[in-house]
Image: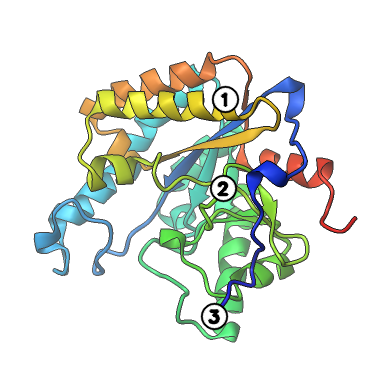
Amino acid sequence: MDNELFDYSPIVDREPIHWPGGARVAFYVGLNVEHYQVDRPSTSIFPGTAALAPDPLNYGWRDYGPRVGIWRLIESLDRHGLRASVMLNSDVTRHYPQIVEAGRARGWTWVAHGRDNSTFQADMSVEDERAYLTEVVGTIEEATGRRPRGWLGPALTETFRTPRLLAELGLDYVLDWANDDQPYRLNVPGMLSVPYSIEVNDISLFVGKSLSGPDFVRIVQDQLDQLYADSATSGRVMSLVLHPFVINQPFRHTYLDQALEHIANHPGVWLTTSDEIAEHYARTTARAGE
């Protein structure tokens, strides 16, 4: 079937985007704060035990994130004056409430990211998916004091109905379609796609490609430099996607700090959140046909 969710739009044919303060690149940290079920397989560093229940090796590796890694990451974000855009499993609010408390104190943005990272809604009926999304969004709103405006599916999964169901709940953007350097409107009234990176992403770089810390710094710098060059006439978006159980291992953490320092001190960069990017784009660009 053809894709009816969004239309093809070559980036060279669009009206220019102008970010606040004359910035050329809008940058946000996409921080994944997740809960994993102990008896189900998920992202693994060693596939040999991934199907076991329990799987102490891989579950423990993932569990390092909320126990240790996130607190190391918070120190770096604070040092560089960065607010996180948190891809939040709603079960995090029950299992790791201290993380939510830390984020509320820092004005983080909360992006709904499913119930946990072991559950996908891909095979749900429309009734089940509507109930699931309603529960996830409501749980996050109750715990954080703010209703999420954005959605990232666990493992970037959706059904063909997901954006419409999210719009019914008052959300106005998704991050699942990682196909652009700018936001764009979906063919669902009131719903945007905001850029999210599956390559400038610590799981892809470190787990998928086994790159080193210095490689990571160079890739982040190269990403920003190219987007900055591209943005001479129209703004671009850069996301840096992080998982504390990966990037905040002790031997990698210093390289994250170097990468954030480069970004935070780069001219022409708007240090922002995914919510603010979506809001600014929706407010300052024309809808198709207007």
User: Residue 283, relative to residue 173: is it above or below?
Assistant: above
Q: Residue at x 32, y 29 (%)?
A: 216
User: Please, is residue 20 above or below residue 7 in the view?
Assistant: above
Classify 146 as above or below 249.
below
Q: CA distance from mark 2 to mark 1?
A: 15 Å
Residue type, mark 2 in image = Asp
Amino acid at the residue labelled 3 = Met
Kind of residue at disc 1: Tyr
In the image, is 241 to the left or to the right of 64? Answer: right
Q: Quadrant of the C terminus?
A: bottom right
Q: Position of residue 161 (x, y in %)?
A: 61, 76
Task: Decide which of 1, 134 is in the foreground and name it.
Answer: 1
| Left or right for 258, reference 184 | left
Q: Residue at x 38, y 42 (%)?
A: 201
Name the residue that disc number 3 marks: 1
Looking at the picture, tell me which residue is in the foreground, 144 or 3.
3
Q: Residues within 10 Å of mark 2 (few under 14, many from 20)?
A: some
Read off the residue under disc 2. 180
